[in-house]
Structures are given as C-alpha cells and as structure tokens.
Image (cartoon, rainbow, N blue to C red):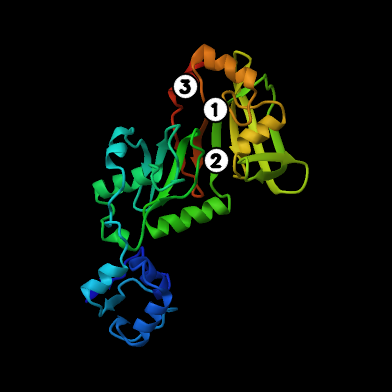
Amino acid sequence: MKELEIGPNEAGQRLDKYLKKLLPRAQSSFFYKMLRKKNIVRNGKKAEGSVQLCVGDRITLYLSDETIIKFSSDKISGNIQGQERIASLPALEILYEDADILVINKPSGLLSQKAAPSDISANELVLQYLLESGAVTPKMLETFRPSVCNRLDRNTSGILIAGKTLRGLQQMSEQLRERTVKKYYRCVAAGSIKERQHLRGFLCKDHKTNKVGIHSSDGQYIETEYEPLGYANGCTLLEVHLITGRSHQIRAHLASVGHPLVGDTKYGDPAVNKKFRNEIGLRHQLLHACRIVLADGQEIVAPLPEAFSRFDFV
C-alpha cells in the first residue's frame, strides 16, 4: 500500500494523469481497472480518472510493493544522470530566484534542454541546484519536474527562466506565450547599421537542414526590432527587441537584410567568420539574451560574456 498527499505542484490535474506520472510503465487500462475496483481511491472513496485533484487530497494505492516497483520508472527519483560531467561544468549563475521561478545566465555551448538522453543541459543543472538547495526533494520529482520555460540555441548565451513549481511554470509559460515578457538581446552584426529598424516578415523552417528562411508572405509571422549601440572592426553592436520568438529568428532576420551575426556558421558570411576566427578566435555567433522585463515590470539583466569584450566598440 502507498498513500500520497496532493500538494500545490500536483493539484489541478486529472487523477489519471497524476497516476501515469507516478507509475509511468502502467497502461491506462490498468488505472481504469484499479479505480473501478477501488484499489486506488481518492480521500478514501471511489474516484473517476477524470476528477480534478485538489491540494490536500489523499490518494491511496492498495497495491503490493512489487506492483508499484514494476510500474515505476527505472530511474531513481531525483537522480540526475552524468554527475561527473555536471560537476565539470560551470556553476549556475543565478540572476533571480523566488518561490516559483529561477532565472539563470546560460553560458554559450550549453543546451537549454536535452536533445539526446546522454546530453547534459541547463535543465539538468537547474534540477541539480534545486535538489541541493532543498527547494525540491526526490519524492516531489516523482510527479513534478521543474523545467526551463524558454529556450536558447546552444551557442546563444543569456537569460533562461525555469519554473520551480507548477504555478511558476504555468504563469511564466503563459506570459511568454502572450508576449507580456519583453525580451532583449545583444549581438554583433556584420556591417555598419546606423539607424533603429523594425523588421517584419514570415519565417519558414526546413526541418531537414534545421535552417529557416525569411519571406514576405506565407509562414510564421515574425517581428524583430533593433538599434545600434556601437561600432568596431566593420561590425555593429546591436540591442535587439525580440517581439516574436521563433526558431533562429534574430540570426535569420538580420542575415536576410545583409547583416548576419559575426561568427554564425549557419546564417553568417564565411569570409567574415574566417576573419574573426583568425583574429580573435571567435568560433560561434555573439548573441546574448541580456535583459527581460516581466509582466509586473520587474527587470532582470544578464551581464555580457567575455567574448563581447574582444571588440572595442565606440
């Protein structure tokens, strides 16, 4: 037998969805049968799988330990794979933290989320930090896992927002979806840009090449606004306001108007990239999520990485 109490991170979801997280190897038909036979009950009473859970509900599983083990995940709750690799990575740079969210400064080269099971990403580092700080426990991870709410390309650095609680995840995901979070980036673009610009267009992605193209019609609508802040070595330091947030939007949009990011091997100018690779050892685009303004007006800033200082902007 196992008895569990529903907390804030589990409340609001269907009972059958909760049970599937708890026992991921079991089939839906198993839960239906156990609920019907009252081998799984809510607050001591028979319950339908569609019932919405509330804080304080008690879910009792009248199942043998062997059955619970059989249908549980084969991963130990709270264990983060690749501990040695995690230890070798830089410590999290925390920009802001409250009871519901965590904002970090992601370094270039680190994935936001796993692309393959063996990957180590910012998501794993966030989980590791929350476990070590006691903000979450292995038991809590049985039915809820904190996660990053936005994504940055591997070689893009800067602000990542993670939800520590279900409320934090839901609220931040809604704000990002409704675009009530203002997102600003710093980047180094090829050429001399003298005036503020507001670009509009449509983005289409080629999933075979993992590249996007910008068109005057047909595709996902995008808006990118930017202004020049300084000049050096035939390049411009820009602050970009990302109004819509699409895959590779800044990189592709700037390339489409003749100002690709310096060091960008996917959308950039090979001759420009070679020049700065030889001169200052630059091997990836300089693109940094530097600032966000939350819906309540709170501003969070991420310091620029060292690579930007290789340009003497004036």
Note whether residue 314 is visible. no
Mark 1 or mark 2, which is nearer the start of the sequence?
2
Residue 183 is tagged as 2
- Label 3, on which residue? 307
Q: Position of residue 237 (x, y in %)?
A: 58, 23
What quarter of the picture does the C terminus occupy? Answer: top right
- Label 1, on which residue? 285
Q: Amino acid at mark 1?
A: Gln
Residue 260 lies, with reference to residue 175, above or below; the image says above
Residue 164 lies, with reference to residue 184, above or below; the image says below
**Looking at this view, is 103 or 127 the one in front?**
127
Element type where label 3 sits in the image: helix
Which image quadrant is residue 256 in? top right
Mark 2–mark 1 distance (CA, rounded to whole Å): 18 Å
| Residue beneath the point at 31% across and 82% down | 41
Mark 1 or mark 3, which is nearer the start of the sequence?
1
Q: Are marks 3 and 1 in contact (CB under 8 Å)?
A: no
